[in-house]
Image (cartoon, rainbow, N blue to C red):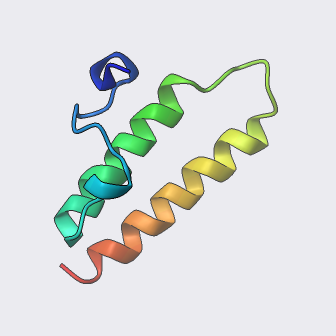
Amino acid sequence: MNPEEYGLSGKGYSKASMPNSLSGYLDFMKDIKRYIEKYNIPSMDGGLYESMRNTADDFESELKKYI
């Protein structure tokens, strides 16, 4: 898998390379949101997309409280 192809940062996330700092998790959440936006299928239920996006936004907001 080429992470740049999917709009990710190129870090190639795996269990062993998950971020272990707040800034790392914020970068990870930005990557997740880019992925969700890129692969949003307009013909699918918009509620699913919005739910995933809201979850990512909420998690990112909580992380920012500790920076």
Residue at position x 19%, y 71% in the image: 21
Q: What residue is drawn where x is 32% and y is 51%?
A: 28
> How many numbered marks are there?
0
Q: Quadrant of residue 2?
A: top left
The percent coordinates of residue 65 (x first, y second) are 29, 81
Give the percent coordinates (x, y) of residue 45. Answer: 81, 33
Q: x, y (%) of residue 11? A: 22, 39
Of 35 and 45, nearer the camera is 35
In the picture, residue 18 is in which quadrant? Answer: bottom left
Res 3 quadrant in image: top left
Where is the N terminus found, in terms of image quarters?
top left
Name the one closer to the observer, 32 or 67.
Answer: 32
Tell me if residue 62 comes above or below residue 48 in the rendering: below
Q: In this view, does 44 lie above or below 15?
A: above
Q: Measuring 49% from the left and 66% from the top, which residue is drawn there?
A: 58
Q: Is residue 52 above or below residue 9?
A: below
- Can you say which quadrant of the picture contains the C terminus? bottom left
Q: Is 7 or 65 nearer to us in this picture? A: 7
Q: In this view, does 35 lie to the left or right of 9?
A: right
Residue at 39%, 22% in the rendered image: 6
Q: Which residue lies furthest to the bottom in this view?
A: 66
Towards the viewer: 45 or 20 = 20
